[in-house]
Image: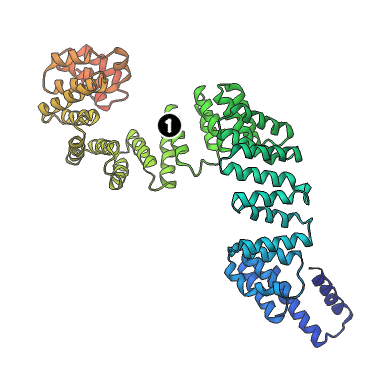
Amino acid sequence: MKHLFCLLGLLCATGVWGLELSEQGRREAEVFNSFLQAIYLPASSQQTFAGLEKTLALEPDSKYVRRLLVSLALAAGNPEQAKPYIGFIDEGENDAQDWEVYAAYEWQAGQVATARQAYEKALALNPDDSKILYQYILLLASLPLEEAVPALEQLVPAHVSEAANIYTTIGRLYAQRLQFEQALSYLQKAVEAAPDDPSPRLVRAEIYEKNSQLFLLLHELEELEKMGYANAGTLSRMGAVFLLSKDVPRAQAYFLKAKADDNTDATSNYFLALLAEQRGDLEGAIGYLKDSAEYPTKSSLRVQVSFYENRLNRPHDTLRTLGQAYRDFPGNVEVAFFYGLALNDNGNHRQAARVFKQILSTNPDYPEARLNYAYALESLHRYRDMEFQLAWLLDRQPRNAAALNLYAYSLAERNQRLDEAQGYIVRALAVSPQDYSFIDTLGWVLIRQGKLAQAQDVLLVLPREIIEQNAEIAYHLGVLYHEQGDTQKALKYLEMAQDKWPAAKKLYKKLRRK
């Protein structure tokens, strides 16, 4: 660009002294202005390219402009666009930059041998240009191993300052082909050539990690930390090694170091969340997951946060987290399923039914989604649709205890087909005889059938703490004792249930008025 700045100086001088430009001067000014507009005014590389083409039209013999056009086309990954201008290499004397650009063109065009020769010419003209050398090393690394290694080794005597980079490149090539002994040999040469260079140590750490040589991996990472090259990636890997070694305090310390280096580091935040969960600090676990750089884009993290919120008994937060995930990850079946569950838990059965119906439209053989769809339909009193879903499911899974229980419970609630309901719940209990919700359903069916003594025997099998914790079971016992004429016992159980079960509150008030 030096000659352009000189021309700019002349143009400025012309303006100052009021000199008139000759025809040649006006033409040079036009070329220069065209060049400036192409380089500095456009908002995109394509506009720059088009501007330089206009400049070339004014100065068709400009080798410099044609080289710039080739460079721009290559930077955009479009060697075809560079093709009309690559002839610059055949005109006049070439400098190192000319050969560098030509080499890049030939490489992108798939002419590796020609590109290699061009890089060698560029290095011969400017052996101290690290950028050209770096590109040449990359090209050699793309060759077959038996050809790449000797060629790379030949560079070392003339480029001693880059020996570590060259040996590291060879080490990577061997590591990629799982020839770890040869890889470690060259990486050791790289360490000896440049003890403060972290690159060969990082590659060695990857090899140790792949081979589960945790002690050597940890040693390598600790050396990097001592050298001051530790970052979130290396620190979190150290934390993971200590976690595998069951040294939880040191693991946590390194995960915290990694997070301090990068607050959004995904690995450290994930493991810190797990450790917080183990301590019972679910609020802290939520915070770590939300800090992760992956939280906006990884659906599983949203689901995990919703689990923690649910365990903290924050149903509205759970629903909000899953609702946002449902919007952010359309078509994600896992997110949709848990969102449907949260909607059912929060009593929004209409929306839950829509969500589960959508899941089943693309995943008809998803039994858990069909079961929860049936549950939402039952809650909406859409009994015909519910029975269709349960019949479909039981036809394929005759021992699906949850489906059998829901069928029996629904019939008992409606006080219909009670013998059929009893058959369903007996089948469910044959699969899971200890499930207290199934036992309660059997008791409820027996109450509806008027078999009060049998119902009492069934329900009183349940532990007292289960009855006290479950308003529905307490309500059923209240109904049982009411039907038996024992108002005092009925009131005791209805009082347990009235705050959480509307039917219990209604019956409790009725009995209190008597």
Viewer-proximal residue, 379 or 125?
Answer: 125
Residue at the image position 38 percent from the left and 47 percent from the top: 331
Report which residue position mark 1 lands on: 307
- Residue 95 located left or right of residue 405: right
- Residue 121 located left or right of residue 290: right
Residue count near mark 1 (Cα–Cα under 10 Å), binned few <14, some 14–19, many ≥20: some
Residue at the image position 24 percent from the left and 39 percent from the top: 377
Q: Does the image show residue 192?
A: yes
As displayed, is residue 261 above or below residue 19? above
Q: At which x and y percent is residue 424?
A: 16, 27
Question: Residue 113, located in which quarter of the rendered image?
Answer: bottom right
Quadrant in which the N terminus appears: bottom right
User: How many numbered marks does the figure carry?
Assistant: 1
As displayed, is residue 16 above or below residue 384? below
The extreme bottom residue here reads 23
Check disc 1 and report its element: helix, strand or loop.
Answer: helix
Q: Does the image show residue 37?
A: no
The extreme right residue here reads 17
Viewer-proximal residue, 149 or 355?
Answer: 149
- Residue 368 located left or right of residue 417: right
